[in-house]
Amino acid sequence: MAAFSGLIAISLGLGLAAASGFRVFLPPMLLSGAINIGLIEASGQLALLDGWGAFSVLLVAVVLEIGSYLIPWLDNLLDVVATPAAVLAGVGMMGSVIGAETDYDPIVQWTVAAIGGGGVAGTVQTGTVATRALSTGTTGGLANPIISVVEAIMAIVVTVLALLAPLLCLALVCAGTFYALRMIGRVRNKPKTAHVA
């Protein structure tokens, strides 16, 4: 039973970390909402997200983040800041969930969060950067707002799925991470192909 609850906590944490790779502030805002309506218990570090005041602050941050990504070229500049922020958010989200849902030793808790949460959030974020780079190169940035809207929708879907069906979300995270790695490889290999030709 403890192993199963640990798997659920890790699945939830990985889902929230992956969603942080799409948008940094959306997952904590939705998690705060889930805590405020009683869907998730506000124990441990998750207590910071308890209360509608915390939700409101995160809502303002979400509006600013999503709005900024809708401006072509500014979205590429934001990726410079968003990538390390997404990794930190992934570590924080996963570590907080594991700490609240399990009795793991803090060293284990934060090591798993750093490797799993940080790795997944960083991979997803790098995949979005690669997708946006391809879009900028092929459409001059005109398609980037559409990509930004899709990313925001994905952040919402992954977060809600993590909260309601963590194991199903784990499968989605695995598939999404594979896709992100393919996009990263595509962008990295593009200059080599052009150079050989």
Image (spheres, grey):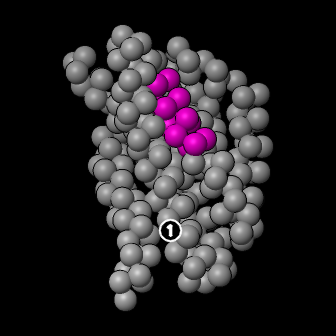
Q: From this viewpoint, is residue 164 visible?
A: no
- Give me the residue at 30% from left, 23% from top: 6
The crowding category of the residue bearing disc 1, from other C-alpha atoms within 10 Å (few below 14, some 14 to 19, many at least 20), is some
| Place of residue 111 in the rendered image (x, y in percent of width and height, measured from the top left) | 38, 23
* Quarter of the image with the N terminus in it: top left
In percent of the image, x 36 and y 27: which residue is there? 112
Q: Position of residue 25 (x, y in %)?
A: 64, 42
Closest to the observer, 99 or 184: 184
85 in the magenta segment: yes
Q: Is residue 81 left or right of residue 68?
A: left
Identify the residue under disc 1: 131
Q: For the residue labelled by badge 1, is the local secondary structure a helix, a strand or a loop? A: helix
As drawn, is 109 to the left or to the right of 46? Answer: left
* Residue 177, image x, y percentages: 36, 53
Q: Identity of the amino acid at label 1?
A: Thr
* Magenta segment boundaries in residue numbering: 84-96
Quadrant assignment, res 185: bottom left
Q: Is residue 196 left or right of residue 36?
A: left
